[in-house]
Amino acid sequence: FPWFLAVNSGAVPLDDAGVAQYGAKAAQQPHAGRTGVTYNPALSKSAKIMMATTVLYLIIQLPASTEESETTVAADQAKGEHFWALVGLAACIIAFILYLRECIKEANEDKALEAVIEGIKSKQISITAALHFAKSTSKHDLSQELVSEDAKRLKKIIRPFFAQYDVDCSGHLDVSEFNQLLIELGEKYPGPKVMEKFKEQDKDNSGSLCFEEVAEFLYQFIKDELMQKPCDEQTIKKMIPAYEEDDEEEAIPEDLADLSPAQQLQRVLFRSIWMMGVGTVMVLIFSDPMVDALSNWGTRTGIPAFYISFVLAPLASNASELLSAYTYAAKKSQKSITTSLSTLVGAACMNNTFCLGIFLSLVYFRGLAWQFTAETIAIVLIQWIIGLLTIFMRTHNKLHAAIILLCYPGCLGIVWTLENVLAWD
């Protein structure tokens, strides 16, 4: 439901290519049937992490399925699953730490580089401007030996241009495509000179240039040409267009507005720790009574407690994701919709690592049996469906949002079918 809400509240008009139009291009009144959201590529990476973390369920599920096929006694099943619960717990802890590390890395990523790459793809930045940017912002002197960090960064800038010049999508540049690259670099040569340059770069004599050969050529161009043409920071800024969503400012609470940045950071950290502490205490106090209440509702209505919990519990446990998804999406920018959907994918990653680790610790330390085959299959399957939609479609319209919304009751349907038709669990 939060994904459906985010897409609908953040929807803007789509162009003929099906890409969302943000900022000044967005109409005040979106046209029905042609609205949606387009998010940054970073969300696809998060979706892949989400899908990868679902593998953790298999560490306990596979042994549990084996034990269930051999005995119906829960105590005997628990003994056979005991070791694997510990393995799963250790794997969840490691995965959770690695996920936090990746989140920190993403938060500190080179945002300027990402903005430049987006500008290259939308043909707002010329290759000369991009190479000047690479030269001026590299951490090391590009006139010296290229270190791996700068090489990776330079290739990220070059790759979108390579795709533009590779007109026939062969993965290589022929002579005519290479000549177009030279022209845009300001290097206009007669035909024979172009062929000579081409052969110089064609190291494997294949008759075409692969990406690595083009990257090496552009690196040499930076060394031989741009190093002799200094370009100050202001000139580079003029060459690189501004992005409206990059100028988006977060609202600062009134009580923090007059403080210095250092004081604001200190106050925000204190407030965050305080609120997390209060929230933890409330969970400890009310979690058991809430579980008892949901169980009693199931007993009185004759509906299994799982189904009642599946519908009602997320309204309390995931209220923060619901609110933040709507709040960010309503800003109607590519940056905000990416943040909005990232909170939801991040919540799934947390469930697959941190929350699953808590469950496995209970299974291990209390000697319980894992008897959630149907639920596990449903969780993994639904996450893979949403993950694949996120990876292969950078634009989601209201139809995609409706499909993802249907995954919510669909999950219940899968569990009911597996339990009542196939008699699993």
Image (cartoon, rainbow, N blue to C red):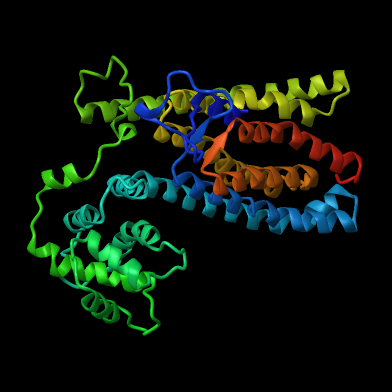
* Relative side of 159 to 4, left or right: left
Residue at x-position 63% and y-position 50% = 54
Q: Is residue 142 visible?
A: no
Indicate left or right for 416 with 388 as reference: right
Is 379 or 276 nearer to us in this picture? Answer: 379
| Image quadrant in which the C terminus is located | top right
Residue at image position (37%, 84%) is 204
Looking at the image, which residue is at 51% across and 43% down? 394
Is 22 situated left or right of 58 in this image?
A: left
Residue lying furthest bottom: 205
Q: Quadrant of residue 316?
A: top right
Q: Which percent across, then down, holds residue 75?
A: 84, 49
Residue furthest to the top? 254
Please tell me whether residue 360 is drawn above or below residue 21 in the rendered image: below
Question: Is 313 rendered above or below residue 181?
Answer: above
Image quadrant holding the N terminus, namely: top right
Q: Residue at x 21, y 61 (%)?
A: 185
Residue occupying the far front of the picture: 191
Q: Position of residue 405 (x, y in %)?
A: 66, 31
Seen in the picture, residue 160 relative to 257 is either above or below; the reply is: below
- The spot of residue 60 in percent (x, y) is 71, 54
Closer to us: 218 or 95: 218
Residue nearest the viewer, comparing 43 with 32 = 32
**x and y percent of residue 117 in the render?**
33, 50
Residue 272 seen in the figure: yes
Q: Is residue 365 above or below residue 146?
A: above
In the image, 240 versus 408, the foreground residue is 240
